[in-house]
Image (cartoon, rainbow, N blue to C red):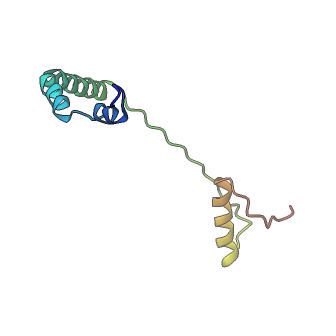
Amino acid sequence: MNTPNSPADDVQDDEIALFALWDTLVQNKWLIIAAIVLSLALATTLAFIMTPKYEAKVLATFAEEGKSSGGLSALAGQFGGLAEMAGVNLGGGGGN
């Protein structure tokens, strides 16, 4: 009473034939090797032909001579400047 499309037949059809897959890879090994060698040659050629591009940005700030303070307030001012460069507002402002 098995029908041609029974669930048991579907399970057997869903299996992966690893040996058939391996045979396909072995038969096409030269094509696979050629593709890898061609890719490596192209990447190496591009690496030597392309001009490297380096970019650097510098932000320099200078302290005013009349505004020298010592101790913790100077340290806080330095970290405030660093936070400002990063775009962070620490508050505590100074109302000038």
Q: In the rendering, at what x and y percent does residue 70 appear? A: 67, 76
Question: Which quadrant would residue 13 be assigned to in this image?
Answer: top left
Instruction: Kindly give the residue lying farthest to the front in the view shown.
Output: 1
Quadrant showing the C terminus = bottom right
Q: In the picture shown, does residue 22 fall above or below 76?
A: above
Residue 64 in the figure: left or right of residue 58: right
- Quadrant containing the N terminus in the rendered view: top left
Whether residue 43 is visible here, answered yes or no, is yes
**Measured from the top left, where is residue 26 in percent x and y?**
12, 27
Is 81 drawn above or below residue 9 in the view shown?
below
Residue positioned 64% across, 72% down in the render: 75
Please identify the residue farthest to the bottom as the structure is shown. Answer: 71
Disc tally is 0
Residue at 78 percent across and 64 percent down: it is: 91
Q: Position of residue 36 (x, y in %)?
A: 21, 27
Left or right, 26 with reference to 38: left
At 26% from the left and 34% from the top, the residue drawn is 16
Identified at 87% across, 63% down, the residue is 95
